[in-house]
Image (spheres, helix red, strand yellow):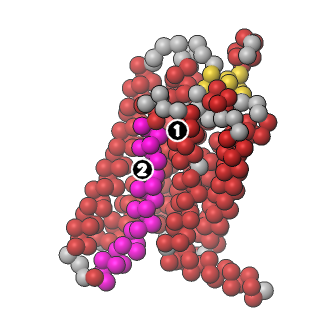
Amino acid sequence: MNASLTNDTLFFAVYAGVGSMGYVLLAVVLLAYLATVLASATVMMLIFLDTSLHKPMYIFLFSLILNGLIGSTAIWPKVMNILSTNSPLISWEGCIAQVFFVLTYGACNYSLLAVMAYDRFVSIFQPLQYHTIMTPLKVKQLMFVANLMPTAVMLGQTYIASQLPLCRFEVHKIFCDNLAVVSMSCSRSQLSNLYGIINTILFVVLPVFFILLSYVKIIVLSLKASTNARKKVFETCSPHIITFVNFSLVSLFSLVYNRYSFLPVEANIVQSVNYILFPPLLHPIIYGIKTQEIRQSFSKVIKRMLLQ
């Protein structure tokens, strides 16, 4: 690639090693993305239209699904374009935009999962006071903390990344993230490292600690309850637990890959797909299958359509 091109454009070097696997990846991404849009739109439509689902739990779920849909849409159409045109290029501005959406996707996911754990905690430990605690104002405050605050903070992280001077113009991932930009910079930024550590503590470590603590207390309480009560608690919490475990595992895999960069290109593809393609697809499906109220709402819509 010539110098004039690299001054304005970044090159995804990882696609050079994909070869014939690119067509397989394109098919997987296309099918998964379309399924994500369909599953997300279905659950979000049910929550929006069915007044019986206008509860804090489903408001938070709506936001979680929307966050995954935005994260997917910010990344995968570009990936599919590259795979279909065999043109692994992206503008600097486009790369920085991907950095922002990837950062925000991860931070908001953990923040929303923590807020949802709090909602489940209150509903189990203080069921009689639930509606006085989870007021519309409280829900708005939690939504602010879980969405707008991570977005604002990650905007700062993205700005720091955008100011790094670049000495290399090859991205060794299938999309841009903060680590990819840092690895292309001429020197390590102490401010970027410090900001990243603080963000990790605020939007990964603390939410995970809070979720685990909440479920330890819920499990302890369940062990003292009757069999029917334990069953009800499990039915209430199982979608959230599955979603949390799923996202935590793919995040851990991504962390391991980023730390051990000697892993082959196939590992890069797997960790990228696992992190920002499959969770947005699985989350609405998990809640759709495991949550009785969503299943009932879906059944009502189907019956209404068939009777028309």
Determine whether, in the image, residue 273 is placed left or right of residue 115: right
Tell me the kind of residue under disc 2: Ser
Instruction: Identify the image quadrant of the C terminus.
Output: bottom right
Above or below, comparing residue 262 to residue 129 in the picture: above
Q: Nearer the viewer, residue 27 or 52?
A: 27
Q: Main secondary structure of the magenta part?
A: helix
Question: Mark 2 — residue?
Answer: 248
Q: Nearer the viewer, mark 2 or mark 1?
A: 1
Taking the view exactly as shown, the residue that stands out farthest to the top is: 3
Where residue 27 appears, x then y in whole percent?
A: 71, 50
* Picture quadrant where residue 284 is located: bottom right
Q: Nearer the viewer, residue 249 or 235?
A: 249
Where residue 207 appears, x then y in whole percent?
A: 37, 49
Determine whether, in the image, residue 29 is placed left or right of residue 239: right
Disc sitting over residue 267 in the figure: 1
Residue interval drawn in magenta: 228-256
The number of discs equals 2
